[in-house]
Amino acid sequence: METTLTKDKENLVILNMTIPANEADSAYNLAANRISQNVNINGFRRGKAPKSVVERHVGVDRIEHEALDMILPKYISKAIYDNKLDTITQPSLVNYNYEHGQDLKVTIEVETRPEFELASYKDLDLKAEIAPEDKDAFDKTLENYLTQHASLELVLDRPSNEKDIVVFDFDGTCNGEKIQGGSAKGYALDLANSNFIPGFAEQLVGHNIKEEFNIEVTFPEDYRDEKLKGQKAAFAIKLNEIKQRVLPELNDEFVKKATRFSTVDELKADIKDYLEKQRESQKKTSAENAVFKAVSDATTIDIPQSMINREVNAIANDYRQRLSYQGVNWADFVQSQGGEVKFGETLADEAKIRIKNSLIIDKISKEEKLTVEKEDFTGKLSQISAAYGSTPDAIVKQFGQNPQFINSISQQIINDKVRDFLIENNKFEYVEVKPEVKAEEKSAKAEKTEKKETKAKKTTKKDK
């Protein structure tokens, strides 16, 4: 076989291959024989029709394509290996010239991985940002255990507070019209964990049983109903019940009943261990982000548009699937992200980051000779099966014949090995940084504080 290689635009490679006539003819004859065994031709038993009859019955093109499917894979693999091509797509057949008795001329197109110089990725001194340690995390976690098993008691002698559960009737209107689905009777709402419109639950605080009152809210700009986006609405409220949580006493009896532990000390030790592991996990993630950013910022890669387009499509399809599970309309979602053009730009930016990180991981794994071993695969399958409440054998039985699944698992293993390698071979200084508060969150907090202060002043005046 003779092969000439031509580099086309960006990372596209054209392979012009010449396959000897005797091998091409042999493949053609074999293809014709195979097809004859699977088609019915009048006057002949299956597999007994002459080649000329098979050609008239199914067409020469079909036989040639069958022959190409048989003969090309080994020649393409050899051409890729001989020319040391790092391919990222399946080779595609551009054209061919199948003249019987003559050498077979074939043109193949394949995309290769972009070539680039990898920046230094070892022995770096880096700063990794982490959130300040929550000094109350232990107490909050312990309280959460108690809250999950709290009983509810009716409140009769005070107004509602932000920790209560209230049962109420409501009827909403917007621009003088009733809101579809905006009314209910006997609705129970946990004021501390409300999924209502921002500002709704807060206005149910400070009211007494049987009290009737009105509240006003503004629907978010990204609300799913076009008619209500950014619109002001009024709700007539009647408060029927106030319930408060009564936490159980923290003792060994409660622990035995509510957890897998026998004593309070065992439960506390487990919480402490969990929080320590969570902190270490946060530090590891922060370190990974810091080293990837440093290497990525210092590495220049000319990413072909074809790669970006494929990744954008993959990301968009993933979004579509997840949103369909949530019952969210795709067109509405795109509009909420600023429209097709802006959302397309967002996807392209995300695609470039993903591709760049993937190329960097691949190059580091090759530089450091990081490979997937049998025990790695077994370990990863155990993790996956545990997450799905299954067994490794069941996972293999369900997905083991799927090449995409195998490739995905292998890539996850390589990703993990590269991340571990980078953390082990670089130095990190962990810097505590408070997370930024968004402007709208600041505004909401300020408004909430102002309301509390106003209530406090009113209470003071009444006391006087």
Image: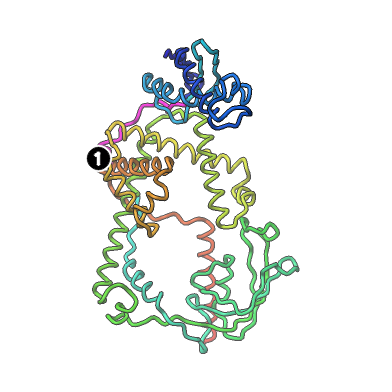
Q: Secondary structure at mark 1?
A: loop
Of 384 and 424, the residue lying toward us: 384
Instruction: Identify the magenta region.
Output: 111-125
Residue 112 in the magenta stretch? The answer is yes
Figure check: 330 above or below 179: above
At x 27%, y 66%, the residue is 272
The image quadrant where one finds the N terminus is top left
Residue 371 in percent (x, y) is at: 29, 37
Figure check: 277 above or below 342: below
- The dominant secondary structure in magenta is loop
Residue 184 in percent (x, y) is at: 64, 75
Where does label 1 land, which residue? 425
Question: How many labels were placed on the picture?
Answer: 1
Residue 218 in the magenta stretch? The answer is no
**Do we see residue 453 in this rendering?**
no
Of 73 and 162, the residue lying toward us: 73
**Do we see residue 287 in this rendering?**
yes
Residue 2 in percent (x, y) is at: 43, 12
Q: Is residue 123 left or right of residue 151?
A: left
